[in-house]
Image (cartoon, rainbow, N blue to C red):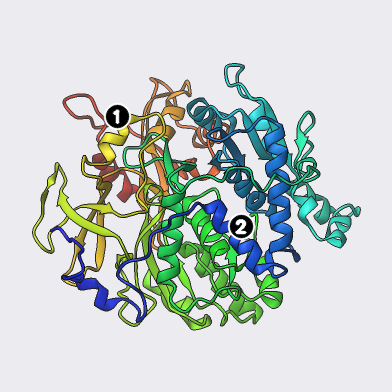
Amino acid sequence: MIVTMDNTAPQPWVKNYQPGVPAEIELPTESLSKMFERSVAEAGELPATEFFGRRVSYRELGDQVARAAEGLRKLGVRAGDRVALILPNCPQHVVAFYAVLRLGAVVVEHNPLYTSRELRHQFEDHQARVVIAWDKAVAAVREFPQDVQLDQVISVNLLEAFPTIKRIALNLPVKKLRETKASLSAAAPGTIPFRDLLKSARLDPNHPLPSVGDLAVIQYTSGTTGAPKGAMLTHYNLYSNALQGEAWMEGAKEREEILYAILPMFHAFGMTLYLTFGIKKQGLLVLFPKFDPELILEAMKKSPATVYCAVPPIYERTAMAAKEAGVSLRSAKYCISGAMNLPDHVVELWESVSGGLLVEGYGMTESSPVALGNPFHLTRRNGTIGVPFPSTLMKVVELDDPSVEVDQGEPGELLLKGPQVFSGYWNNPEETAKTLTHDGWLRTGDVVTVDTDGFTTIVDRAKELIITGGFNVAPTEVETVLRGHPDVRDAAVFGKSLERGGEMVVAAVELEPGVELDEAALREHCRAQLAGYKVPKRIVAVQDLPRSLLGKILRKQIREEVTPKL
Protein backbone atom coordinates (compact mmCIF):
# COMPACT_ATOMS: atom_id res chain seq x y z
CA MET A 1 0.00 0.00 0.00
CA ILE A 2 1.33 3.44 -0.91
CA VAL A 3 -0.07 6.73 0.25
CA THR A 4 0.73 9.91 -1.66
CA MET A 5 -0.07 13.50 -0.86
CA ASP A 6 -1.31 16.25 -3.14
CA ASN A 7 -3.72 19.15 -2.88
CA THR A 8 -6.54 17.41 -4.76
CA ALA A 9 -6.60 14.12 -2.84
CA PRO A 10 -6.40 14.63 0.93
CA GLN A 11 -5.17 11.62 2.84
CA PRO A 12 -7.78 9.39 4.52
CA TRP A 13 -6.28 10.00 7.96
CA VAL A 14 -6.53 13.81 7.81
CA LYS A 15 -10.22 13.65 8.72
CA ASN A 16 -9.14 12.12 12.05
CA TYR A 17 -6.74 14.94 12.90
CA GLN A 18 -7.64 17.16 15.80
CA PRO A 19 -9.62 20.09 14.32
CA GLY A 20 -7.22 22.84 13.30
CA VAL A 21 -4.25 20.56 12.53
CA PRO A 22 -3.14 21.13 8.93
CA ALA A 23 -2.35 18.39 6.43
CA GLU A 24 0.92 20.15 5.63
CA ILE A 25 3.18 22.54 7.50
CA GLU A 26 5.01 25.56 6.17
CA LEU A 27 8.57 24.29 5.86
CA PRO A 28 11.44 26.17 7.54
CA THR A 29 13.74 28.47 5.60
CA GLU A 30 16.06 29.45 8.46
CA SER A 31 18.27 27.69 10.99
CA LEU A 32 17.58 26.72 14.58
CA SER A 33 20.00 29.46 15.63
CA LYS A 34 17.80 32.10 14.02
CA MET A 35 14.76 30.55 15.65
CA PHE A 36 16.51 30.66 19.03
CA GLU A 37 17.41 34.33 18.64
CA ARG A 38 13.80 35.16 17.82
CA SER A 39 12.53 33.33 20.90
CA VAL A 40 15.03 35.17 23.10
CA ALA A 41 13.99 38.54 21.66
CA GLU A 42 10.26 37.87 21.98
CA ALA A 43 10.16 36.07 25.35
CA GLY A 44 12.69 38.38 27.03
CA GLU A 45 12.29 38.26 30.82
CA LEU A 46 9.94 35.26 30.80
CA PRO A 47 11.47 32.09 32.29
CA ALA A 48 13.20 29.71 29.89
CA THR A 49 14.53 27.03 32.27
CA GLU A 50 13.92 25.89 35.82
CA PHE A 51 16.34 23.57 37.63
CA PHE A 52 15.69 22.52 41.23
CA GLY A 53 13.64 25.70 41.58
CA ARG A 54 16.10 28.14 40.03
CA ARG A 55 14.82 29.95 36.96
CA VAL A 56 16.74 31.52 34.08
CA SER A 57 14.99 33.97 31.75
CA TYR A 58 15.14 33.88 27.97
CA ARG A 59 17.22 37.04 28.03
CA GLU A 60 19.72 35.42 30.42
CA LEU A 61 19.74 32.23 28.36
CA GLY A 62 20.50 34.20 25.20
CA ASP A 63 23.33 36.01 26.96
CA GLN A 64 24.85 32.74 28.18
CA VAL A 65 24.64 31.18 24.71
CA ALA A 66 26.40 34.21 23.17
CA ARG A 67 29.18 34.06 25.77
CA ALA A 68 29.59 30.27 25.56
CA ALA A 69 29.74 30.52 21.76
CA GLU A 70 32.50 33.13 21.99
CA GLY A 71 34.37 30.97 24.51
CA LEU A 72 34.19 28.00 22.15
CA ARG A 73 35.28 30.16 19.22
CA LYS A 74 38.34 31.26 21.17
CA LEU A 75 39.12 27.58 21.80
CA GLY A 76 39.20 27.04 18.05
CA VAL A 77 35.71 25.71 17.28
CA ARG A 78 34.73 26.58 13.73
CA ALA A 79 31.79 25.92 11.40
CA GLY A 80 31.52 22.23 10.58
CA ASP A 81 33.55 21.08 13.60
CA ARG A 82 31.98 18.40 15.75
CA VAL A 83 31.58 19.20 19.46
CA ALA A 84 30.66 16.32 21.77
CA LEU A 85 28.12 16.84 24.55
CA ILE A 86 28.03 14.29 27.38
CA LEU A 87 25.40 15.82 29.62
CA PRO A 88 22.23 14.98 31.54
CA ASN A 89 19.29 17.37 31.46
CA CYS A 90 20.50 20.65 32.97
CA PRO A 91 20.56 24.35 32.04
CA GLN A 92 24.15 24.03 30.79
CA HIS A 93 22.95 21.46 28.25
CA VAL A 94 20.58 23.99 26.69
CA VAL A 95 23.33 26.63 26.59
CA ALA A 96 25.93 24.27 25.12
CA PHE A 97 23.54 22.99 22.44
CA TYR A 98 22.72 26.43 21.07
CA ALA A 99 26.25 27.80 21.54
CA VAL A 100 27.67 25.05 19.33
CA LEU A 101 24.97 25.57 16.69
CA ARG A 102 25.50 29.35 16.71
CA LEU A 103 29.05 28.83 15.42
CA GLY A 104 27.81 26.61 12.60
CA ALA A 105 29.40 23.66 14.37
CA VAL A 106 27.79 20.24 14.87
CA VAL A 107 26.44 18.92 18.17
CA VAL A 108 27.19 15.24 18.87
CA GLU A 109 25.00 14.00 21.72
CA HIS A 110 26.12 11.18 24.04
CA ASN A 111 24.62 9.30 26.96
CA PRO A 112 26.48 10.47 30.12
CA LEU A 113 26.03 7.02 31.66
CA TYR A 114 27.97 5.30 28.88
CA THR A 115 31.19 3.56 29.76
CA SER A 116 34.52 4.64 28.30
CA ARG A 117 34.37 1.72 25.87
CA GLU A 118 30.95 2.76 24.53
CA LEU A 119 31.95 6.40 24.17
CA ARG A 120 35.31 5.58 22.57
CA HIS A 121 33.76 3.86 19.56
CA GLN A 122 31.59 6.89 18.86
CA PHE A 123 34.49 9.33 19.27
CA GLU A 124 36.58 7.24 16.89
CA ASP A 125 33.79 7.72 14.36
CA HIS A 126 32.94 11.42 14.66
CA GLN A 127 36.44 12.58 15.79
CA ALA A 128 35.26 15.57 17.83
CA ARG A 129 38.24 17.34 19.41
CA VAL A 130 36.26 19.42 21.93
CA VAL A 131 34.08 17.83 24.62
CA ILE A 132 31.57 19.42 26.99
CA ALA A 133 30.99 16.80 29.66
CA TRP A 134 29.24 16.41 33.01
CA ASP A 135 32.07 16.31 35.54
CA LYS A 136 31.03 12.79 36.57
CA ALA A 137 31.48 11.64 32.94
CA VAL A 138 34.95 13.14 32.57
CA ALA A 139 36.63 10.03 34.00
CA ALA A 140 35.23 7.91 31.14
CA VAL A 141 36.69 10.37 28.62
CA ARG A 142 40.07 10.31 30.38
CA GLU A 143 40.25 6.54 29.84
CA PHE A 144 40.29 6.87 26.04
CA PRO A 145 43.37 5.40 24.35
CA GLN A 146 45.93 7.81 22.94
CA ASP A 147 44.67 7.43 19.37
CA VAL A 148 41.46 9.27 20.40
CA GLN A 149 42.81 12.82 20.40
CA LEU A 150 41.03 15.58 22.29
CA ASP A 151 42.04 19.23 22.30
CA GLN A 152 39.81 20.47 25.11
CA VAL A 153 37.60 18.92 27.79
CA ILE A 154 35.09 21.34 29.31
CA SER A 155 33.53 20.12 32.55
CA VAL A 156 30.01 20.94 33.75
CA ASN A 157 29.20 21.06 37.46
CA LEU A 158 25.43 20.63 37.86
CA LEU A 159 25.50 22.19 41.32
CA GLU A 160 26.45 25.56 39.83
CA ALA A 161 22.97 25.69 38.27
CA PHE A 162 21.27 25.10 41.63
CA PRO A 163 19.62 27.86 43.67
CA THR A 164 22.21 29.29 46.06
CA ILE A 165 20.46 28.08 49.21
CA LYS A 166 20.23 24.50 47.93
CA ARG A 167 23.86 24.53 46.83
CA ILE A 168 24.92 25.63 50.31
CA ALA A 169 22.70 23.01 51.94
CA LEU A 170 24.47 20.22 50.06
CA ASN A 171 27.67 21.10 51.94
CA LEU A 172 26.08 20.38 55.32
CA PRO A 173 27.38 17.31 57.23
CA VAL A 174 24.24 15.28 56.60
CA LYS A 175 24.62 11.81 55.09
CA LYS A 176 21.69 12.08 52.66
CA LEU A 177 22.85 15.50 51.46
CA ARG A 178 26.42 14.25 51.01
CA GLU A 179 25.11 11.32 48.98
CA THR A 180 23.02 13.65 46.82
CA LYS A 181 26.01 15.89 46.20
CA ALA A 182 28.21 12.92 45.28
CA SER A 183 25.58 11.66 42.82
CA LEU A 184 25.45 15.01 41.03
CA SER A 185 29.06 16.13 40.91
CA ALA A 186 32.68 14.97 40.97
CA ALA A 187 36.12 16.55 40.79
CA ALA A 188 37.37 17.04 37.22
CA PRO A 189 40.97 18.30 37.42
CA GLY A 190 42.72 19.36 34.24
CA THR A 191 39.51 20.49 32.52
CA ILE A 192 38.10 23.90 31.62
CA PRO A 193 35.13 24.70 33.89
CA PHE A 194 32.00 25.50 31.88
CA ARG A 195 31.53 28.60 34.03
CA ASP A 196 34.73 30.01 32.49
CA LEU A 197 33.10 29.96 29.03
CA LEU A 198 30.33 32.12 30.44
CA LYS A 199 32.90 34.74 31.47
CA SER A 200 33.76 35.35 27.81
CA ALA A 201 32.62 38.42 25.93
CA ARG A 202 29.50 37.98 23.81
CA LEU A 203 29.95 36.56 20.32
CA ASP A 204 29.94 39.21 17.61
CA PRO A 205 26.27 39.36 16.51
CA ASN A 206 27.50 39.62 12.92
CA HIS A 207 29.21 36.23 13.15
CA PRO A 208 27.74 34.16 10.27
CA LEU A 209 24.66 32.16 11.16
CA PRO A 210 24.32 28.56 9.97
CA SER A 211 21.99 27.89 7.04
CA VAL A 212 18.83 25.81 7.22
CA GLY A 213 20.43 22.99 5.22
CA ASP A 214 23.58 22.75 7.37
CA LEU A 215 24.29 19.74 9.53
CA ALA A 216 23.18 20.48 13.10
CA VAL A 217 23.41 17.22 15.07
CA ILE A 218 24.95 13.78 14.84
CA GLN A 219 22.78 11.50 16.94
CA TYR A 220 24.01 7.96 17.53
CA THR A 221 21.51 5.19 17.13
CA SER A 222 21.45 1.46 16.74
CA GLY A 223 19.29 2.17 13.71
CA THR A 224 17.73 -0.73 11.86
CA THR A 225 20.71 -3.07 11.73
CA GLY A 226 22.24 -3.07 15.23
CA ALA A 227 25.67 -1.40 15.11
CA PRO A 228 25.64 2.19 16.48
CA LYS A 229 25.74 4.74 13.67
CA GLY A 230 25.68 8.54 13.64
CA ALA A 231 22.45 9.81 12.12
CA MET A 232 23.04 13.20 10.46
CA LEU A 233 20.23 15.64 11.26
CA THR A 234 20.20 19.06 9.64
CA HIS A 235 18.72 22.30 10.94
CA TYR A 236 15.98 21.71 8.35
CA ASN A 237 15.21 18.21 9.69
CA LEU A 238 15.04 19.26 13.33
CA TYR A 239 13.22 22.53 12.76
CA SER A 240 10.67 20.73 10.54
CA ASN A 241 9.92 18.19 13.25
CA ALA A 242 9.50 20.98 15.81
CA LEU A 243 6.99 22.66 13.48
CA GLN A 244 5.19 19.35 12.92
CA GLY A 245 4.96 18.89 16.69
CA GLU A 246 3.69 22.44 17.06
CA ALA A 247 0.96 21.75 14.50
CA TRP A 248 0.05 18.48 16.24
CA MET A 249 -0.32 20.15 19.64
CA GLU A 250 -3.11 22.39 18.36
CA GLY A 251 -4.07 24.86 21.06
CA ALA A 252 -0.68 24.97 22.79
CA LYS A 253 0.09 28.64 23.41
CA GLU A 254 3.32 30.54 22.94
CA ARG A 255 4.97 31.70 26.17
CA GLU A 256 2.45 29.79 28.31
CA GLU A 257 3.37 26.10 28.15
CA ILE A 258 5.43 24.38 30.86
CA LEU A 259 7.34 21.36 29.60
CA TYR A 260 8.75 18.78 32.02
CA ALA A 261 12.10 17.67 30.60
CA ILE A 262 12.17 14.14 31.97
CA LEU A 263 13.18 12.37 28.77
CA PRO A 264 16.93 12.80 28.29
CA MET A 265 17.89 15.55 25.87
CA PHE A 266 20.70 13.37 24.51
CA HIS A 267 17.90 11.17 23.14
CA ALA A 268 16.22 12.25 19.89
CA PHE A 269 12.73 12.48 21.44
CA GLY A 270 13.90 14.65 24.33
CA MET A 271 16.09 16.79 22.08
CA THR A 272 13.24 17.68 19.74
CA LEU A 273 10.59 18.03 22.42
CA TYR A 274 12.56 20.39 24.65
CA LEU A 275 15.51 21.89 22.79
CA THR A 276 13.67 22.69 19.56
CA PHE A 277 9.87 22.54 20.06
CA GLY A 278 10.02 23.91 23.61
CA ILE A 279 12.26 26.81 22.65
CA LYS A 280 10.20 27.48 19.51
CA LYS A 281 7.05 27.78 21.70
CA GLN A 282 9.01 30.00 24.13
CA GLY A 283 7.87 27.72 26.93
CA LEU A 284 9.39 27.01 30.35
CA LEU A 285 11.61 23.91 30.43
CA VAL A 286 11.58 22.35 33.89
CA LEU A 287 14.73 20.22 33.79
CA PHE A 288 15.32 16.94 35.65
CA PRO A 289 18.73 15.20 35.45
CA LYS A 290 16.96 11.89 36.08
CA PHE A 291 13.45 10.63 36.67
CA ASP A 292 12.54 11.14 40.32
CA PRO A 293 8.79 11.12 41.21
CA GLU A 294 9.43 13.04 44.44
CA LEU A 295 11.20 15.88 42.59
CA ILE A 296 8.51 15.94 39.91
CA LEU A 297 5.66 16.23 42.39
CA GLU A 298 7.52 18.96 44.27
CA ALA A 299 8.00 20.90 41.02
CA MET A 300 4.29 20.48 40.20
CA LYS A 301 3.41 22.68 43.17
CA LYS A 302 5.37 25.66 41.78
CA SER A 303 5.32 25.09 38.02
CA PRO A 304 2.54 22.63 37.05
CA ALA A 305 3.35 20.84 33.80
CA THR A 306 1.17 21.37 30.74
CA VAL A 307 3.34 19.20 28.42
CA TYR A 308 4.39 15.91 29.97
CA CYS A 309 5.89 13.43 27.52
CA ALA A 310 7.47 10.20 28.70
CA VAL A 311 7.57 6.42 28.32
CA PRO A 312 4.84 4.19 29.82
CA PRO A 313 6.67 3.18 33.04
CA ILE A 314 7.24 6.86 33.90
CA TYR A 315 3.57 7.69 33.33
CA GLU A 316 2.55 4.83 35.57
CA ARG A 317 4.97 5.70 38.40
CA THR A 318 4.13 9.40 38.25
CA ALA A 319 0.38 8.79 38.38
CA MET A 320 0.67 6.35 41.29
CA ALA A 321 2.95 8.70 43.24
CA ALA A 322 0.61 11.66 42.61
CA LYS A 323 -2.39 9.68 43.84
CA GLU A 324 -0.54 8.62 46.96
CA ALA A 325 0.73 12.14 47.71
CA GLY A 326 -2.51 13.89 46.79
CA VAL A 327 -0.78 16.08 44.18
CA SER A 328 -2.84 17.23 41.19
CA LEU A 329 -1.73 16.47 37.65
CA ARG A 330 -4.73 18.19 36.05
CA SER A 331 -2.49 20.78 34.39
CA ALA A 332 -1.01 18.13 32.04
CA LYS A 333 -2.87 18.61 28.75
CA TYR A 334 -0.41 17.33 26.14
CA CYS A 335 0.91 13.86 26.89
CA ILE A 336 2.65 11.72 24.28
CA SER A 337 4.11 8.28 24.94
CA GLY A 338 6.80 6.82 22.74
CA ALA A 339 9.70 4.37 22.47
CA MET A 340 7.66 1.31 23.55
CA ASN A 341 4.11 -0.01 23.39
CA LEU A 342 1.58 1.83 25.55
CA PRO A 343 -0.61 -0.55 27.61
CA ASP A 344 -4.31 0.28 28.06
CA HIS A 345 -4.06 0.19 31.85
CA VAL A 346 -1.43 2.95 31.78
CA VAL A 347 -3.69 5.10 29.58
CA GLU A 348 -6.62 4.60 31.95
CA LEU A 349 -4.53 5.33 35.04
CA TRP A 350 -2.92 8.47 33.63
CA GLU A 351 -6.13 9.92 32.23
CA SER A 352 -7.81 9.39 35.59
CA VAL A 353 -5.39 11.85 37.22
CA SER A 354 -4.39 14.22 34.38
CA GLY A 355 -6.15 16.91 32.39
CA GLY A 356 -5.79 15.51 28.89
CA LEU A 357 -5.54 12.50 26.64
CA LEU A 358 -2.47 10.24 26.70
CA VAL A 359 -1.65 9.28 23.13
CA GLU A 360 0.98 7.05 21.58
CA GLY A 361 3.35 8.21 18.87
CA TYR A 362 6.09 6.70 16.77
CA GLY A 363 9.45 7.78 15.55
CA MET A 364 13.10 6.95 15.24
CA THR A 365 16.30 8.94 15.40
CA GLU A 366 16.50 8.91 11.61
CA SER A 367 13.19 10.85 11.45
CA SER A 368 14.20 13.54 13.95
CA PRO A 369 12.39 11.54 15.55
CA VAL A 370 8.57 11.79 15.37
CA ALA A 371 6.73 10.61 12.26
CA LEU A 372 3.33 9.32 13.41
CA GLY A 373 1.07 10.04 16.33
CA ASN A 374 -2.41 9.61 17.66
CA PRO A 375 -4.50 12.78 17.50
CA PHE A 376 -5.22 14.74 20.68
CA HIS A 377 -8.84 14.08 19.88
CA LEU A 378 -11.53 11.49 20.41
CA THR A 379 -10.54 9.95 17.06
CA ARG A 380 -7.37 8.55 18.67
CA ARG A 381 -7.12 4.75 18.66
CA ASN A 382 -5.38 3.14 21.59
CA GLY A 383 -3.13 0.24 20.64
CA THR A 384 -2.00 1.93 17.42
CA ILE A 385 0.89 4.35 16.84
CA GLY A 386 -1.52 6.71 15.14
CA VAL A 387 -1.35 8.33 11.71
CA PRO A 388 1.35 10.25 9.83
CA PHE A 389 2.23 13.74 11.02
CA PRO A 390 1.54 16.70 8.71
CA SER A 391 3.79 16.71 5.62
CA THR A 392 4.70 13.05 6.24
CA LEU A 393 4.15 10.20 3.78
CA MET A 394 4.19 6.48 4.43
CA LYS A 395 4.02 3.25 2.51
CA VAL A 396 4.06 -0.41 3.50
CA VAL A 397 6.19 -2.80 1.44
CA GLU A 398 7.29 -6.41 1.29
CA LEU A 399 10.02 -7.25 3.78
CA ASP A 400 12.45 -8.53 1.19
CA ASP A 401 11.67 -6.02 -1.54
CA PRO A 402 10.96 -2.37 -0.66
CA SER A 403 9.89 -1.66 -4.24
CA VAL A 404 6.80 -3.88 -3.90
CA GLU A 405 3.85 -2.55 -1.91
CA VAL A 406 1.64 -4.91 0.07
CA ASP A 407 -2.15 -5.02 -0.19
CA GLN A 408 -4.30 -2.89 2.10
CA GLY A 409 -4.28 -4.29 5.64
CA GLU A 410 -1.48 -6.77 4.98
CA PRO A 411 1.68 -6.68 7.15
CA GLY A 412 4.81 -5.20 5.67
CA GLU A 413 7.75 -2.93 6.43
CA LEU A 414 6.90 0.71 7.17
CA LEU A 415 8.67 3.28 4.98
CA LEU A 416 8.56 7.03 5.66
CA LYS A 417 9.24 10.22 3.76
CA GLY A 418 9.08 13.80 4.97
CA PRO A 419 11.14 16.89 5.81
CA GLN A 420 12.19 15.34 9.12
CA VAL A 421 13.88 12.32 7.48
CA PHE A 422 17.64 12.37 7.95
CA SER A 423 20.28 12.76 5.26
CA GLY A 424 22.24 9.59 6.08
CA TYR A 425 24.77 8.14 8.52
CA TRP A 426 28.04 9.91 9.27
CA ASN A 427 30.91 8.36 7.30
CA ASN A 428 28.81 5.28 6.53
CA PRO A 429 27.51 5.26 2.94
CA GLU A 430 26.90 1.50 2.98
CA GLU A 431 24.46 1.65 5.92
CA THR A 432 22.92 4.80 4.48
CA ALA A 433 22.17 2.94 1.25
CA LYS A 434 20.53 0.12 3.23
CA THR A 435 18.31 2.52 5.16
CA LEU A 436 17.42 5.18 2.57
CA THR A 437 16.02 4.05 -0.78
CA HIS A 438 17.24 5.73 -3.97
CA ASP A 439 14.14 7.97 -3.99
CA GLY A 440 14.45 9.05 -0.37
CA TRP A 441 12.20 6.68 1.58
CA LEU A 442 13.36 5.74 5.09
CA ARG A 443 13.22 2.01 5.81
CA THR A 444 12.17 1.74 9.46
CA GLY A 445 12.66 -1.99 9.93
CA ASP A 446 9.28 -2.17 11.68
CA VAL A 447 6.54 -4.49 10.44
CA VAL A 448 3.11 -2.84 10.53
CA THR A 449 -0.45 -3.06 9.34
CA VAL A 450 -2.43 0.02 8.31
CA ASP A 451 -6.23 0.29 8.32
CA THR A 452 -8.29 2.22 5.79
CA ASP A 453 -8.10 5.39 7.92
CA GLY A 454 -4.31 5.28 8.10
CA PHE A 455 -4.05 4.18 11.73
CA THR A 456 -0.93 2.08 11.99
CA THR A 457 -0.19 -0.87 14.25
CA ILE A 458 3.25 -2.38 14.85
CA VAL A 459 3.04 -6.14 14.64
CA ASP A 460 6.73 -7.09 14.66
CA ARG A 461 10.20 -5.73 14.21
CA ALA A 462 12.27 -6.75 11.24
CA LYS A 463 15.23 -5.43 13.18
CA GLU A 464 16.27 -7.30 16.31
CA LEU A 465 16.75 -4.31 18.60
CA ILE A 466 15.61 -4.61 22.19
CA ILE A 467 13.67 -1.67 23.63
CA THR A 468 14.08 -1.32 27.38
CA GLY A 469 13.10 1.77 29.33
CA GLY A 470 12.64 3.59 26.04
CA PHE A 471 16.23 2.96 24.89
CA ASN A 472 17.45 0.74 22.06
CA VAL A 473 19.83 -2.09 22.88
CA ALA A 474 21.69 -3.74 20.01
CA PRO A 475 22.01 -7.48 20.73
CA THR A 476 25.31 -7.66 18.85
CA GLU A 477 26.95 -5.16 21.19
CA VAL A 478 25.98 -7.12 24.31
CA GLU A 479 26.95 -10.40 22.69
CA THR A 480 30.41 -9.05 21.87
CA VAL A 481 30.97 -8.11 25.49
CA LEU A 482 29.78 -11.51 26.75
CA ARG A 483 32.07 -13.33 24.32
CA GLY A 484 34.95 -11.41 25.86
CA HIS A 485 34.51 -13.29 29.15
CA PRO A 486 36.76 -16.37 29.43
CA ASP A 487 33.85 -18.60 30.52
CA VAL A 488 31.73 -17.84 27.45
CA ARG A 489 32.16 -19.57 24.13
CA ASP A 490 29.25 -17.82 22.40
CA ALA A 491 26.16 -15.80 23.25
CA ALA A 492 22.76 -14.79 21.89
CA VAL A 493 20.92 -11.77 23.31
CA PHE A 494 17.22 -11.03 22.85
CA GLY A 495 14.33 -9.17 24.45
CA LYS A 496 11.56 -10.71 26.54
CA SER A 497 8.32 -8.74 26.43
CA LEU A 498 7.07 -7.46 29.78
CA GLU A 499 3.44 -7.21 30.79
CA ARG A 500 3.75 -3.50 31.58
CA GLY A 501 5.42 -2.65 28.28
CA GLY A 502 8.96 -2.71 26.97
CA GLU A 503 11.35 -5.61 27.14
CA MET A 504 13.87 -7.24 29.43
CA VAL A 505 17.36 -7.96 28.11
CA VAL A 506 18.04 -11.70 28.22
CA ALA A 507 21.22 -13.57 27.25
CA ALA A 508 21.62 -17.23 26.37
CA VAL A 509 25.24 -18.36 26.59
CA GLU A 510 27.26 -21.37 25.53
CA LEU A 511 29.88 -21.94 28.23
CA GLU A 512 33.36 -23.37 27.84
CA PRO A 513 33.63 -27.10 28.69
CA GLY A 514 33.53 -27.80 32.43
CA VAL A 515 32.41 -24.27 33.36
CA GLU A 516 29.31 -23.67 35.48
CA LEU A 517 27.18 -20.59 34.99
CA ASP A 518 27.97 -17.67 37.31
CA GLU A 519 25.22 -15.25 36.38
CA ALA A 520 26.35 -12.55 38.81
CA ALA A 521 29.93 -12.60 37.51
CA LEU A 522 28.80 -12.32 33.87
CA ARG A 523 26.52 -9.41 34.72
CA GLU A 524 29.36 -7.67 36.53
CA HIS A 525 31.57 -8.23 33.47
CA CYS A 526 28.90 -6.57 31.30
CA ARG A 527 28.38 -3.73 33.76
CA ALA A 528 32.02 -2.75 33.49
CA GLN A 529 31.69 -2.21 29.74
CA LEU A 530 28.06 -1.33 29.10
CA ALA A 531 25.51 1.20 30.31
CA GLY A 532 23.31 -0.30 32.99
CA TYR A 533 20.20 -0.64 30.84
CA LYS A 534 22.11 -2.88 28.38
CA VAL A 535 23.18 -5.39 31.04
CA PRO A 536 21.14 -8.61 30.78
CA LYS A 537 18.58 -9.01 33.57
CA ARG A 538 18.69 -12.78 33.05
CA ILE A 539 21.48 -14.99 31.74
CA VAL A 540 20.81 -18.65 31.01
CA ALA A 541 23.18 -21.39 29.92
CA VAL A 542 22.34 -23.57 26.90
CA GLN A 543 24.10 -26.56 25.45
CA ASP A 544 24.14 -25.31 21.85
CA LEU A 545 22.87 -22.10 20.29
CA PRO A 546 20.76 -22.69 17.15
CA ARG A 547 22.47 -21.54 13.95
CA SER A 548 21.64 -21.23 10.28
CA LEU A 549 23.47 -23.19 7.59
CA LEU A 550 25.81 -20.21 7.30
CA GLY A 551 26.56 -20.35 11.01
CA LYS A 552 24.50 -17.27 11.99
CA ILE A 553 22.86 -17.48 15.41
CA LEU A 554 19.08 -17.66 15.10
CA ARG A 555 17.97 -15.24 17.81
CA LYS A 556 14.28 -15.71 17.11
CA GLN A 557 14.55 -19.47 17.63
CA ILE A 558 16.57 -19.18 20.85
CA ARG A 559 14.06 -16.61 22.12
CA GLU A 560 11.20 -19.03 21.48
CA GLU A 561 13.07 -21.83 23.23
CA VAL A 562 14.29 -19.90 26.27
CA THR A 563 11.46 -17.44 27.01
CA PRO A 564 8.95 -20.04 28.34
CA LYS A 565 11.57 -21.16 30.91
CA LEU A 566 12.15 -17.68 32.36
In this view, the residue farthest toward the right is 173
Q: Is residue 112 left or right of residue 382?
A: right
| Secondary element type, mark 2 | helix
Give percent across and percent down for residue 388: 29, 64
The label shown at residue 410 is none
| Secondary element type, mark 1 | helix
Amino acid marked by disc 1? Glu
Which residue is label 1 attached to? Answer: 430
Residue 232, placed above or below residue 375: above
Mark 1 residue crowding within 10 angstroms, few (<14) / some (14–19) / many (20+): few
At a point 42% along the width and 51% down the height, the residue shown is 236
Q: Is residue 325 left or right of residue 246?
A: right
Figure quadrant of residue 112? top right
Which residue is label 2 attached to? Answer: 37
Q: Is residue 401 left or right of residue 326?
A: left
Give percent across and percent down for residue 130: 63, 31
Q: Quadrant of the N terminus?
A: bottom left
Q: Nearer the viewer, residue 72 or 359?
A: 72
Give percent across and percent down for residue 91: 69, 54
Residue 547, placed above or below residue 337: above
Whether the residues at callouts 1 and 2 have beta carbons within 8 Å, the answer is no
Q: Nearer the viewer, residue 384 or 562?
A: 384
For residue 272, say whether it is visible: yes
For residue 337, say whether it is visible: no
Q: Nearer the viewer, residue 369 or 118?
A: 369
